[in-house]
C-alpha cells in the first residue's frame, strides 16, 4: 500500500480503516505492470515445455521391476497433476494481464465520466438532463 494524502488525478484511493494508509491505484500503473504477467506466463510455459521434453526424453529410468512399477504408480499421476496445474497457472497469469489492462481502461473511462459530471457543460441545467422539456 502506498501512503497518500488523497486522490490524485487518474487514480483511485481507498483508505484502510483506522490505519491512516491509503491504497492509491493509478491507471498508468495498472497498464504498465500488466505485461509482466504475460511475460511471466510465457517464461513459465517455456519452463514447462523444457521440463516435459526432458522428462519424456528420459523415459522410465526407474525400470520395470516391482520397485520401478510401484514408483511409476505414484510418479506418473503426480507428474500429470503438476503439468495440468502449471498449465492452469500459465493461463491465469495471461488472463491477469488482460484483466489489468481492462481495469486500467475502466479507471480512465470512469475518471472521464466523473470529470464530465462536474464540468460546466455537464451541470449547466442544474443537473437535470431534460430541464427544457418539462412543459412540452
Image (cartoon, helix red, strand yellow):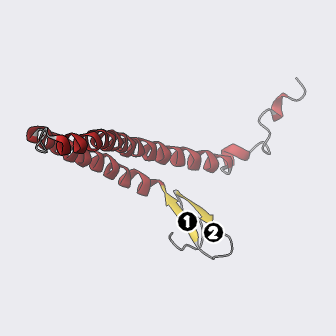
Mark 2 or 1, nearer chain start: 2
Task: Identify the residue under disc 2.
Answer: 16
Q: Is residue 95 left or right of residue 8?
A: left
Of the pair 41 and 67, the residue shown nearer to us = 67
Q: Is residue 52 left or right of residue 26?
A: left
Rendered residue at 61%/50% (across/down): 115
**Direction right: furthest residue:** 135
Rendered residue at 20%/47% (across/down): 47
Q: In what quadrant of the picture does the C terminus appear?
A: top right
Rendered residue at 36%/45% (across/down): 89
Q: Are marks 2 and 1 in contact (CB under 8 Å)?
A: yes
Quarter location, residue 4:
bottom right
Q: Residues within 10 Å of mark 1 (few under 14, many from 20)?
A: some
Q: Secondary structure at mark 1?
A: strand
Q: CA distance from mark 2 to mark 1?
A: 7 Å
Look at the picture and state if 116 lies above or below 21: above
Q: Position of residue 102 (x, y in %)?
A: 47, 42
Q: Position of residue 124 (x, y in %)?
A: 74, 45
Using the image, tell me which numbered label, if any, was put on residue 135: none
Of the pair 21 and 114, the residue shown nearer to us = 21
Q: Is residue 111 left or right of residue 57?
A: right
Task: Identify the residue under disc 1.
Answer: 23
Q: Position of residue 113 (x, y in %)?
A: 61, 44
Rendered residue at 27%/42% (across/down): 79
Q: Secondary structure at mark 2?
A: loop
**Direction top: furthest residue:** 136
Q: Position of residue 122 (x, y in %)?
A: 69, 44
Q: Residues within 10 Å of mark 2 (few under 14, many from 20)?
A: few
Amino acid at each position: 500500500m502506498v501512503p497518500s494524502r488523497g486522490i490524485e488525478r487518474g487514480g483511485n484511493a481507498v483508505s484502510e480503516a483506522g490505519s491512516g494508509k491509503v491504497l492509491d491505484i493509478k491507471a498508468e500503473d495498472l497498464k504498465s505492470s500488466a505485461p509482466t504477467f504475460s511475460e511471466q506466463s510465457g517464461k513459465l510455459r517455456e519452463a514447462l515445455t523444457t521440463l516435459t521434453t526432458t522428462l519424456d526424453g528420459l523415459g522410465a529410468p526407474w525400470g520395470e521391476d516391482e520397485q520401478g512399477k510401484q514408483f511409476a504408480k505414484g510418479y506418473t499421476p503426480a507428474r500429470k497433476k503438476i503439468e495440468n496445474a502449471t498449465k492452469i497457472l500459465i493461463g491465469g497469469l495471461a488472463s491477469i494481464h488482460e484483466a489489468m489492462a481492462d481495469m486500467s481502461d475502466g479507471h480512465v473511462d470512469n475518471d472521464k465520466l466523473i470529470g464530465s459530471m462536474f464540468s460546466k457543460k455537464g451541470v449547466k441545467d442544474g443537473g437535470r438532463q431534460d430541464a427544457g422539456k418539462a412543459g412540452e
